[in-house]
Image (cartoon, helix red, strand yellow):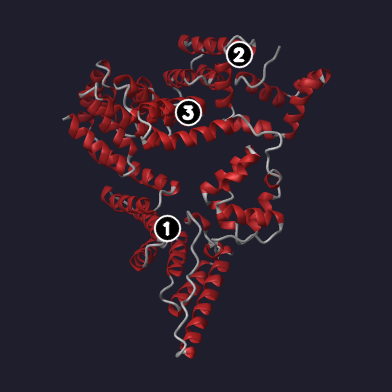
């Protein structure tokens, strides 16, 4: 039975259904808790969902069960790296290589971990690239969108991550210069024409950009015709040039949201050059934007038939159109199949997200069709019994059958995730529970406790205080407020270890509200005055908004008030 559950987990993992993979591996672990491979596989699934706390817990269990297995240390290293602890990741990978120097998994992981560790130590004074300074100003967000060569890159998540990484650490520019898109961006920002080995592959990405996930390859140059047919060669080349002009006219119409005109131009381009796949994919993108999903699906199928270079794009668009048309669970299966095929061609994060959304929508429809009040009550009792037996994955399965509109489903499921150490998932369920029933104080107790376990004491404090608005005399909520205040005061007084302070600060800096405070020119001046001009502090604190933001920084451990 354990092997059967493991096989199902491996299949779900290979298909990118990581939630299902975790469920199957958990069932297998319940049956064979001493099997180190099962914990290793579940760690990989958690890491794929970026739930690195749970991934770390399983990786630690893996090496505990089998300390001489190199792959276990690879799982450990990946989890530490995901949590931002590059030094621990390096140590884990090195342990794996010490056991088996020829093992490939620790080797490749160690290189990434060492790079991250070096990056976290900060750039050397002379190490910052002079070119990288161009990414620090505001012109980047005006020049790149204005240039047709780089405009499409701004809709590609991996390119935006490179930009963000360079802005955080200018030294990292050198890591990305091998990417032709980055070379083009540098050229645009410097007003210099940059040339590289892949220039011929870079073309303007057609609008609408939402439907694209990667730059569109240019049409291949026509091969020279035999010298004995010069007129035919000349005519073929001229036809391709006319088709390209029609495509460019279609792109221009897209920018103006004139979709009907764009369709006409792309269609004419296809008539002139029926071998051009990009005309089909561009027209499919426009059909998708117009809500003509059936036409979009037909063009995507034709593109897949004609060539492999744009499979991923076409299949992703097809899946998107199918989800728009989906009304039944079976309809979503076709969309899911399209997304899965697209991911085998190219592991695009946007496609993966759409796959997860489609699978979630399919599950919700199945749950609604399954729901029966009598059976739901029976499942609820089974879930409670399994929870008492500490069989949390099985308990969650029974709780979920009660239906997606019942807040207790999310409350109890959050408790299961908390027991499993999957705190981000637990927090998501707790928030959904409050969304469905904001008046019940127990919901805030659950959410605050999860945030407290995640050491987000400032957020936990806000949650407990919000709960007290609905139930002012609730003792659990008041105890939660007291605990949060105690930890925040300890941080403010410097009574926590440097390691814990560093961990809290790193986590706080990922908070969008904290990031916005540091990008606010007024707040930057306030923080400078706190250090250099104490007399101005009292004036600043008269502003309630400034006081609130300072308190936010204090609660997060970023600023200490002495």
Residue visible at 76% across and 21% down in the picture: 530
Q: Is 235 left, or right, of 122 in this rendering?
A: left
SS label for mark 3: helix
Q: Residues within 10 Å of mark 2 (few under 14, many from 20)?
A: many
Q: Residues within 10 Å of mark 1 (few under 14, many from 20)?
A: many
Picture quadrant of residue 128: top right
Q: Is 27 left, or right, of 194 in this rendering?
A: left
SS label for mark 2: helix
Residue visible at 59% across and 14% down in the picture: 488
Picture quadrant of residue 552: top right
Does label 3 or label 1 sit earlier along the sequence? 3
SS label for mark 1: helix
Residue visible at 47% across and 65% down in the picture: 282
Residue 462's label in the rendered image is none
Q: Which residue is mark 3?
A: 90
**Residue 495: image x %, image y %?**
60, 9
Does label 2 or label 3 sit earlier along the sequence? 3
Picture quadrant of residue 3: top left
Residue nearer the viewer, 474 or 282: 282
Q: Is 490 left, or right, of 519 in this rendering?
A: left
**Image quadrant in which the N terminus is located:** top left
Q: Is 497 left, or right, of 374 in this rendering?
A: right
Cα separation, mark 3 vs mark 1, equals 36 Å
Cα separation, mark 1 vs mark 2, equals 49 Å
**Residue 346: image x %, image y %?**
40, 52
Does label 1 or label 2 sit earlier along the sequence? 1
Q: Which residue is mark 2?
A: 491
**Residue 404: image x %, image y %?**
33, 34
Q: Which residue is mark 1?
A: 313
Residue visible at 50% across and 74% down in the picture: 265
Cα separation, mark 2 vs mark 3, equals 29 Å
């Amino acid at each position: 039975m354990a092997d059967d559950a493991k096989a199902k987990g491996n299949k779900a993992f290979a298909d990118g259904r990581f939630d299902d993979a975790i469920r199957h591996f958990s069932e297998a672990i319940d049956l064979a808790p001493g099997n180190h491979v099962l914990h290793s596989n579940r760690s990989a699934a958690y890491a794929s969902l970026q739930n690195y706390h749970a991934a770390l817990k399983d990786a630690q269990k893996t090496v505990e069960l089998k300390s001489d297995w190199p792959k276990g240390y690879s799982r450990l290293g990946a989890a530490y790296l995901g949590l931002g602890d590059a030094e621990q990741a390096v140590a884990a990978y090195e342990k794996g290589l010490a056991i088996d120097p020829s093992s490939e998994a620790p080797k490749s992981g160690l290189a990434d971990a060492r790079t991250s560790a070096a990056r976290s130590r900060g750039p050397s004074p002379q190490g910052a690239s002079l070119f990288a300074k161009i990414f620090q100003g505001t012109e980047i967000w005006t020049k790149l969108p204005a240039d047709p060569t780089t405009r499409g890159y701004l809709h590609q998540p991996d390119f935006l991550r490179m930009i963000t990484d360079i802005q955080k650490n200018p030294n990292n520019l050198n890591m990305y210069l091998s990417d032709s898109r980055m070379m083009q961006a540098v050229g645009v920002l410097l007003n210099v024409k940059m040339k590289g080995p892949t220039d011929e592959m870079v073309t303007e990405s057609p609008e609408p950009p939402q439907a694209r996930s990667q730059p569109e390859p240019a049409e291949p140059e026509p091969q020279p015709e035999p010298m004995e047919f010069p007129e035919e060669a000349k005519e073929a080349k001229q036809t391709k040039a006319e088709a390209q002009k029609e495509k460019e006219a279609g792109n221009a119409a897209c920018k103006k949201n004139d979709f009907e005109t764009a369709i006409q131009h792309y269609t004419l381009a296809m008539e002139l050059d029926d071998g051009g796949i990009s005309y089909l994919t561009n027209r499919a993108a426009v059909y998708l934007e117009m809500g003509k999903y059936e036409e979009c699906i037909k063009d995507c199928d034709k593109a897949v038939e004609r060539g492999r270079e744009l499979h991923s794009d076409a299949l992703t668009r097809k899946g998107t159109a199918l989800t728009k048309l989906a009304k039944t669970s079976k309809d979503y299966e076709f969309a899911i199949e399209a997304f899965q095929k697209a991911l085998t061609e190219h592991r695009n994060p946007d496609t993966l997200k759409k796959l997860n959304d489609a699978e979630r929508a399919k599950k919700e429809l199945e749950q609604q069709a399954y729901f029966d009040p009598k059976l739901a009550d029976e499942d609820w009792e089974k879930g409670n019994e399994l929870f008492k037996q500490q069989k949390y994955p099985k308990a969650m399965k029974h709780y979920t059958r009660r239906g997606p509109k019942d807040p207790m489903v999310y409350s109890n499921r959050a408790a299961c995730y908390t027991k499993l150490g999957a705190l981000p998932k637990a927090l998501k369920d707790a928030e959904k529970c409050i969304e469905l029933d904001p008046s019940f104080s127990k919901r805030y107790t659950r959410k605050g406790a999860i945030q407290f376990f995640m050491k987000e004491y400032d957020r936990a404090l806000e949650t407990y205080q919000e709960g007290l608005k609905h139930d002012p005399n609730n003792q659990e909520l008041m105890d939660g407020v007291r605990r949060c205040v105690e930890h925040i005061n300890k941080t403010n007084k410097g009574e926590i270890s440097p390691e814990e302070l560093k961990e809290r600060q790193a986590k706080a800096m990922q908070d969008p509200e904290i990031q916005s405070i540091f990008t606010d020119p007024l707040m930057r001046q306030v923080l400078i005055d706190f250090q250099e001009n104490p007399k101005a502090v009292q004036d600043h604190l008269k502003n309630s908004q400034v006081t609130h933001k300072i308190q936010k920084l204090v609660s997060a451990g970023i600023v200490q008030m002495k």
